[in-house]
Amino acid sequence: MSVDLSFEQVVRENQAMVFRTLYRLTGNREHIDDLAQEVFLRLYRALPTFRGESLVSTYLYRIAVNVAQNEWKRRKRADRPLISMSDETSSWEDRLEHPDRNAEQQMEEREFRLRVEEQLQELSDVERTVLVLYHQEERSYEQIASALNMPIGTIRTHLHRGRKKLRERLQVSEGIAICTVKR
């Protein structure tokens, strides 16, 4: 019974992160509930063999990345677009409203976020994953390296290349100069 309660606690504490990560990695909500369920099912099955050498949240990130990669492969086989731009009303940007800005500023910011999300989907799987985990999920190099089972230097390389490609794609797509922003 205590195992069930601790699993319930893990789900409650991490479900928002899992949904957010899956959405950011896959680019749409079409199967997000099923994907999240798959993440937690895999965690539940793996808990008896979990050695505790890393945090459960790091383990969950690895599972979420694996599930997202499986979804990418499934989509490629089905020749479906990576993102759905027609579902603007339920996008995650709607939850990040800034009441202190005027409507025009909010619209410009929202359009920019949509362009970033669209261009993010054009990056390689590993570059997109590293960028999402670092910038959107605010994970450290060490946590990302552990979750992806890669050396920290490789994570830094993918982060640098991903940022550069994203910046270039945004400049080309909009014909504007993008300032470099460091976290």
Image: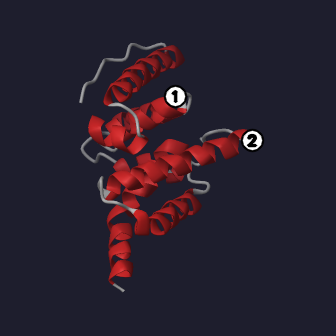
> Which residue is painted at 61% across and 47% down in the image?
70
> Which residue is painted at 49% across and 32% down in the image?
126
**Vertical comparison of 141 with 100: above or below:** above
Residue that carries the numbered disc 1 in the rendered image? 119
Cα separation, mark 2 vs mark 1, equals: 21 Å
At label 2, counting other C-alpha atoms closer than 10 Å, the crowd grade (few under 14, some 14-19, many 20 or more) is few
**Vertical comparison of 17 with 143: above or below:** below
Quadrant occupied by the N terminus: bottom left
> Which residue is painted at 52% across and 67% down in the image?
41
Residue closer to the observer: 12 or 6: 6
Rendering coords of residue 141 (x, y %): 29, 35
- Secondary structure at badge 2 equals helix
The amino acid pointed to by label 2 is Arg
Query: Can residue 107 be seen?
Result: no
Quadrant occupied by the C terminus: top left
**Vertical comparison of 35 with 117: above or below:** below
Q: Which colour scheme is used?
A: secondary structure
Residue 29, label in figure: none
- Secondary structure at badge 1 equals helix
Query: Can residue 127 be seen?
Result: yes
Residue closer to the observer: 155 or 177: 155
Mark 2 and mark 1 lie on one chain; the one further toward the N terminus is: 2
Rendering coords of residue 50 (x, y %): 38, 62
Residue 77, label in figure: 2
